[in-house]
Image (spheres, grey):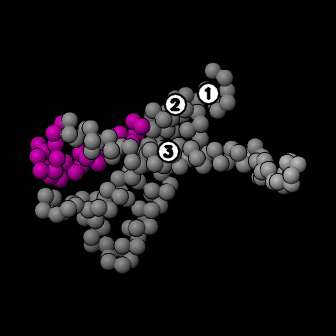
Amino acid sequence: MRNWWRVTLLRPDGGVFIRLSTFAFRAIRELGYWAVQQLVACLAPMLVCELIVFPTIGWSEYASPLGTIGFQIFEALAIGACGCALGLIMGRDPWTRLTGGWIWLLPAALLAFAMVSDIRSFGPSSILSDYFFDAHPGRTEGPMLREVLTYPAWTSVLYSFGVLFAGRRGRRTKPGDAR
């Protein structure tokens, strides 16, 4: 069995120099790519929509031609479209494609864990209003769990689809290949 890391004594003063094998170096690099993509896929689409898209068109839950529920549906679709577009853009990079298809796992697992925990603790009656729709828009703050768990899971799933679709379109190039 091959060691994924090796410690080699190379310094004359007896100090330890850690030399990573190729496998360990690649694993650490991919973990870094995955962590950066995780942040980008979960936060960037929401920030783009909240800071650019919605102020540009002048819509909010209070002033929308779609009504309050229609705006919530439009908001989810717009944030998802931004996530998918970001995945298509990021999926052009061959190194990003290696981990981009797995970005959805952590946010979806957190959402599923939170929903199962709430169902076991409080029952299934408040799941829709807590995680998906604001039952009383304009009168209450709105479901914070939607912003913290549901939208990141939604955008990361669509980000992964975008990366995978971009990877299918540009399959001729692999990481390390010369163009």
Mark 2 neighbour class, 10 Å CA radius: few under 14, some 14 to 19, many 20 or more: many
Q: Whole-Å distance between the Cαs marked 1 and 2?
A: 10 Å
Secondary structure beneath label 2: loop
Q: Is residue 120 above or below residue 27?
A: below
Number of the label disc, if any, that sits on residue 42: none
**Mark 1 vs 3, N-terminal side:** 3
Provide the secondary structure element on which disc 1 rests.
loop
Amino acid on which disc 1 is placed: Thr
The residue pinned by badge 1 equals 173
Tell me the CA gap for discs 1 and 3: 20 Å
Query: Looking at the picture, which amino acid does disc 2 mark?
Result: Arg
Question: Label 3 amino acid?
Answer: Gln
Tell me, yes or no, whether the highlighted magenta stretch contains residue 64: yes
* Disc number placed over residue 37 in the picture, else none: 3
In the rendered structure, which disc, 1 or 2, sits on the residue that comes first in sequence?
Answer: 2
Residue to which mark 2 is pinned: 92
Q: Is residue 165 visible?
A: no
Q: Measuring 27% from the left and 72% from the top, which residue is drawn there? A: 125
Vertical side of 77 occupied by 133: above or below: below
Q: Which residues are magenta?
A: 57-86
Residue placed most toward the observer, 115 or 30: 30
The answer to whether 128 is drawn above or below residue 2 in the figure is below
Residue 136 locus on image (x, y percent): 15, 62
